[in-house]
Image: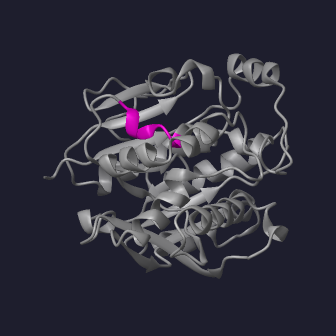
Amino acid sequence: MNTIDLVITWVDGADPRWRAKRQAAGLDSALASANVEGRFRDNGELRYLLRSIERYWPFEGMIYLVTDAQVPSYLAHSARLKIIDHREILDPKYLPTFSSRAIESALHKIPGLSEHFVTFNDDVLLARPVLREDFFGRLGCIVYLTDELLPLTSSAQGLSGHNDALNARRWMLANTGGSSLDRVLEHSPKGIRKSWMQALETDYPELFHQTRSEQVRQPGGQSILANLYGDWCLSQGRGEIRFNQCEYRYSDQLESDPNALADLRAVLGDKLSICINDTSDNRQDVSQLQQHYGNIFEQLFSQPSSYELSA
């Protein structure tokens, strides 16, 4: 009963082979943040996520790193960590994809995945020791919300999180007759029941097909795992809501805030997680940002994990 697998999605947007694949795809979207450099930029967060997992994660289980023919150069061999290529979980007709929505819609198809698993974007780090109930509670699903009311129009769709939440609410109202969410979700780790995702796909196969067909985020697309699943669980009486448990910052805030390190230190031991979301921009030179970012997180998580090669 203590087996909970972790699933992490990761991309290195600077990889020349991956960039050539992205360019050849001719991606286009009316969603402003869908195809910018900041969407795919690797700021080294994965290294610190793995350190936070080694410090705070008490459960047995595998760590699956889901990538597109990429492997971080610093990863050490570990029987507990396995690379999963997109080709292992998505039909070739959907590939290549540059939409996290499409990738996340198929995470429950990872071979050998445990019934209970927790998903992380690579920019979400644990900030304290975790319990099973942090992800599954008494009913099977925990949904973490902010205090921010969900906009009921499309005026905020330039913000991808608002876009995803609004689309999920509209889908729930249209297809199930109700929605349990009227606020913006936190950027948090997500506890998922594999069999529940399988049931959702069985009941709504066209939803999953449409999501996986999206090569890059589109304004009307669905974020099934990160948004819709939680609303669906709540509406089935399978979930509960918690508020303001996850610290959220934009990467450029770390550049301008002299108190960033002290503020993040204060979060450790209190909040469930820390998310430093990359500003959705097309800047090419982010070397100073990444150095500053790395310095801060080296001080927060200074102990290398067993998943890193020795220096």
Residue 69 is left or right of residue 22, and the answer is left
Whether 17 is drawn above or below 123: the answer is above
Whether 216 is drawn above or below 161: the answer is above
Over which residues does the magenta segment extend?
Answer: 104-110
- Residue 91 picture location, percent across and down: 53, 23
Whether 70 is drawn above or below 177: the answer is above
Colour mapping: one colour
- Residue 98 picture location, percent across and down: 68, 34
Asked if the stretch drawn in magenta spans residue 107, the answer is: yes
Along the line of sight, the residue nearer the viewer: 63 or 73: 63
Along the line of sight, the residue nearer the viewer: 64 or 176: 176
Residue located farthest toward the left when viewing the structure as drawn? 1
Location of the C terminus by quadrant is top left
- Residue 284 is drawn in which quadrant? top right
- Residue 272 picture location, percent across and down: 41, 68
At 54% from the left and 52% from the top, the residue drawn is 224
Can the viewer see residue 55 in this picture? Answer: yes
Whether 208 is drawn above or below 170: the answer is above
Can the viewer see residue 44 in this picture? Answer: no
At 49% from the left and 67% from the top, the residue drawn is 231
- Residue 201 picture location, percent across and down: 45, 44
At 47% from the left and 27% from the top, the residue drawn is 74
Asked if the stretch drawn in magenta spans residue 272, the answer is: no
At 41% from the left and 26% from the top, the residue drawn is 83
- Give the number of callouts: 0
Residue 275 is left or right of residue 127, and the answer is right
Residue 300 is left or right of residue 220, and the answer is left
